[in-house]
Image (cartoon, grey):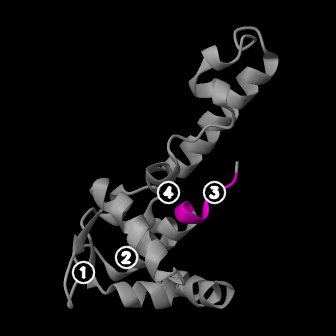
Amino acid sequence: MRLTRAADYAIRCMVYLSFKGQGVLVLKQEIVEQAGIPGPFLAKIVQALGRAHLIEIRQGPKGGYVLIKDPARITLLEVVEVMIGRIRLNACVDRPEACAASTHCRVHRVWEDASAGLRQHLGGITFAELCRDESCLPVFSMHNKES
């Protein structure tokens, strides 16, 4: 499994908003510059984050984005799955009927266990943990050079 660009950008956006703090208005351009997310892509990402009730989108010249959920209650799993859907390493994990052999396939159990393990791991990491101090900020300047 590989994260999509949208999921990566959504994580960057949420890390930055979490670092700024719950309830703080952050301008779109600030996130574009600091998190290295192209403006049009950011507009798409925040729509999904808004629908998930993680952020509020404020329109207008003084508009931007506000983290509305406590970063200690937002996990990496939640943001990843907002962007890509439920994590599964093979289609048979969520839809056993997709494979005629899934009831007796030894590999099916491996995919189930691995998917569950990854979901559990990501579900145990909060954005508050990721932004405990300013050490998360060099990530943004590094991405600015890559993007």
- What residue is shown with label 2? 17
The residue that label 1 is drawn on is 24
Mark 4 Cα shell of 10 Å, populated few (<14), some (14-19), many (≥20): many
Q: Residue at x 38, y 73 (%)?
A: 18
Task: Please tell me in which quadrant of the rendered image residue 28 appears.
Answer: bottom left
Q: Earlier in the sequence, mark 1 or mark 2?
A: 2
Q: CA distance from mark 1 to mark 4?
A: 20 Å
Check disc 4 and report the residue beneath it: 76
Q: Quadrant of residue 20?
A: bottom left
| Magenta stretch: includes residue 6 | yes
Tell me whether the residue at label 1 lies in contact with that at label 2, contact meaning CB atoms closer than 8 angstroms.
Answer: yes
Magenta span covers which residues? 2-7
Identify whether 90 is placed above or below 37.
above
Q: Quadrant of the C terminus?
A: bottom right
Marks 1/2: CA–CA distance: 8 Å
**Does the magenta run of residues contain 5?**
yes
Please report contact status of discs 1 and 3: CB closer than 8 Å, yes or no: no
Q: Which mark is residue 41?
A: none
Q: Is residue 128 visible?
A: no
How busy is the neighbourhood of tag 1: few (under 14 within 10 Å), some, or many (20 plus)? some
Nearer to us: label 3 or label 2: 3
- Residue that lies at the very extreme toward the front in this rendered image: 40
